[in-house]
Amino acid sequence: MLHDTPEWARRHSFFHHSNPRSKDRAKTIFEKTHVRPKVKWARSVLKKKGFTKEQRAEAKSILEIYSTNRGSANMAAGVAVQDACNLALIPDDDYHQTLSVTEAQIVAHGTLKEYSPKNFCKEAQEDDTERKEQYLAEIHKVTTNAILGLREAMKQDNMIIGETEYLEVLPGCELPYNTLPDYGRRGDLKTKWSKPATLKDGSRSWHTASLPSSLSHNFDMNNVFQVTGFWACNGGLPPFLVYANKTDFKVFNKHNTPELKPNSLKEILREICIQSKTTENLLRVANSKEDLLSLVSPTWDAIYWKEPPLYIAEAKKIWGY
């Protein structure tokens, strides 16, 4: 479905909404109106001919600031497991075949092994490298439990469908809401990885990350908001969340989780719409990117602002810190 973006959104390069609980409004606006346009320009400059030496140098600098070192071993491990699950659960287009669990484990391990740890400082590199090695040791088990959990969540489905992108206008909003369910047009996979604890001698021990017993915790409610977006865009298909670690999996759905029942989803959708409409009002009144960013204030100590130093330095410069 095509959407006609209003002028007040086009002038800020803000084309769609997303889960309001994934980050604060300041980070969302900064990413969509400042970072993405700059990165898009930089990649275009480096891909095409006709740009000056100075422009190409600027493009490389932009990518160094806004693209380099923004991943993590945790993120890379999650992606590796999902890719492996896709191969084990979704038949390929050519031969309609899937991988065995053992084959999927090998794929996941190989994918994570290719990840290069962040290296903006010695401490970050050492930490991310240790995490990568620990996750490599447990990724076979996490992959197995993820596959088992997803099969359980979709055992009534005639066929398993992978990522599906939605771009739909929610009630009372003008800009569309963008969301991307991992599976079945309605569900998401969350992997949990062991966490380090520093011992007295400076070494580390690793403790298995627990699976949530419910979704009432503030952090897990972020995921409830995410799947509510699926529900709002897919015609009301009942959402599910699968959590997997190295010891087990857990499936949350409308049958065992109050937060995923229709009445709760309706209330959460109302909150998503209110948050989206607030953002639209800010876009309307701001004449420039600078005006828009001055209307929001970052929560610097929040997890979604844990970015490389160069990225944070540029962000703080824009906000006048």
Image (cartoon, helix red, strand yellow):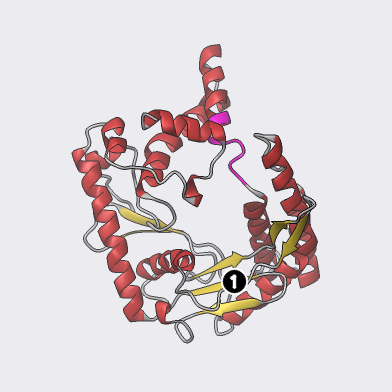
Chain part drawn in magenta: 64-71
Pinpoint residue 236: horizontal percent, then vertical percent.
37, 75
Res 205 → quadrant: bottom right
Is 166 positioned to the left or the right of 75 in the image? left
Pinpoint residue 57: horizontal percent, then vertical percent.
56, 18
Depth check, front residue: 72 or 254 = 72
Q: Residues within 10 Å of mark 1 (few under 14, many from 20)?
A: many
Res 90 → quadrant: bottom right
Depth check, front residue: 272 or 299 = 299
Residue 239 drawn above or below residue 275:
below
The stretch drawn in magenta includes residue 69: yes
The stretch drawn in magenta includes residue 66: yes
Depth check, front residue: 133 or 263 = 133
Pinpoint residue 127: horizontal percent, then vertical percent.
71, 46
Residue 272 drawn above or below residue 148:
above
In percent of the image, x 54 and y 31: which residue is there?
A: 310
In percent of the image, x 31 and y 33: which residue is there?
A: 289
Magenta stretch: dominant SS?
A: loop
